[in-house]
Amino acid sequence: MVERTVEDNPLRALLTALAVAVVCALVVSYSAVTLRPLYVANVEAERQARLESILTALPETMGKVDIADVRARVVELNSGVYTDDVDATTFDPAKAILDVNLSIAVPPERDLAGIKRRAHHAVVYIVHDEGGAPRALILPVYGSGYQSTLYGFLALTADTQTVLGLKFYEQNDTPGIGARIQDPDWEALWPGKMVYDDTGRLRLGVARGQVAPSSEEAEFIVDGISGATRTSLGVHELVRFWLGDYGFGPYLERVRNDRG
């Protein structure tokens, strides 16, 4: 008697493949459902840890700012309008830029930050006082440095006019040189710098060297880091990009108009 194998019976082979596919689908579905809460919790924990780093860098004049006083909102960058269609706790711009439906290509001539693509949305953080009024805005910013991508938070007063702090939480530029963008002494140069001049023109940035205290630029420009020209330029360009039309510019304009 000839022994028949699965390969000899097309129907049995098809049913076996189908059964395996169903089992695999069930396993994947179960894993996705059971692991998602853990994934969301990890993403939120990492986000809060980064956010706390900028809260500690805010000026002492603001007093103690608790993470509970910070509200995350998602902004549609083109319009500058808040949206509830995207979950602020799980939104990941790094993933969004990989999807052509969730991001746009930045024209090379406008791509000061060297990011190539920008997500349609971004999460902003609003610091409120005890009465619920906005005290500060915290904006996520990133862009090309000398040897790496620089990731940080830029904090502004609620009227968008003055810098409260700039803190980078991730970078891999040259140790002891470009990496000094995380030096507390350099971070201390940012609070109090003006973002716009009296005409509304964006002026905030980083110099290629030292800024004379008596110069007109001193009100808006931070000293560059000695020996780290390209990293300093990277910070200058990413700040200008994210405060401009392809970044948070439309959002900040709406904030100013609403306050007016």
Image (cartoon, helix red, strand yellow):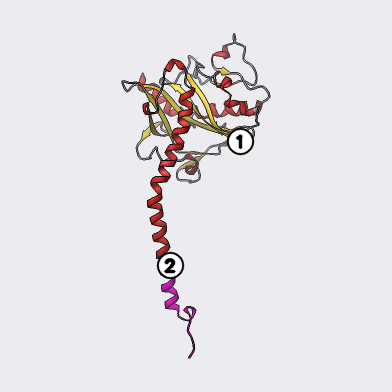
Depth check: give the residue in front, 165 or 215: 165
Question: Within the magenta stretch, is there residue 4?
Answer: yes
C-alpha distance separating marks 1 and 2: 44 Å
User: At 60% across and 29% down in the image, what residue appears?
Assistant: 234
Residue 226 shows which numbered tag?
Answer: none
Q: What element carries label 1?
A: loop
Quadrant of the frame with the C terminus: top left
The quarter of the displayed image where residue 63 is located:
top left
Depth check: give the residue in front, 229 or 67: 67
| Relative image position of residue 77 (x, y in whole percent) | 44, 34
Q: Which residue lies furthest to the bottom in this view?
A: 1
User: At 49% across and 26% down in the image, what residue appears?
Assistant: 154
Callout 1, which amino acid?
Ser
| Magenta-drawn segment | 1-19
User: At 45% across and 35% down in the image, what residue appears?
Assistant: 47
| Relative image position of residue 105 (x, y in whole percent) | 52, 40
Q: Is the magenta stretch mostly helix, strand or loop?
A: helix
**In the displayed structure, does residue 28 sit left or right of residue 235?**
left
Q: Is mark 2 on a helix, strand or loop?
A: helix
| Relative image position of residue 65 (x, y in whole percent) | 41, 23
Residues packed near mark 1 inside 10 Å, few (<14), some (14 to 19) or many (20 plus): some
Residues packed near mark 2 inside 10 Å, few (<14), some (14 to 19) or many (20 plus): few
| Relative image position of residue 32 (x, y in whole percent) | 40, 52
Asked if residue 77 can be seen in this view, the reply is no
**In the displayed structure, does residue 200 sit left or right of residue 71?**
right
Give yes or no for contact between labels 1 and 2 (Cβ–Cβ under 8 Å). Answer: no
Asked if residue 29 can be seen in this view, the reply is yes
Q: Provide the residue designation for mark 2.
A: 20
> Where 218 falls versus 234 (above or below)?
above
Question: Within the magenta stretch, is there residue 138?
Answer: no
Callout 2, which amino acid?
Val
Residue 148 shows which numbered tag?
Answer: 1
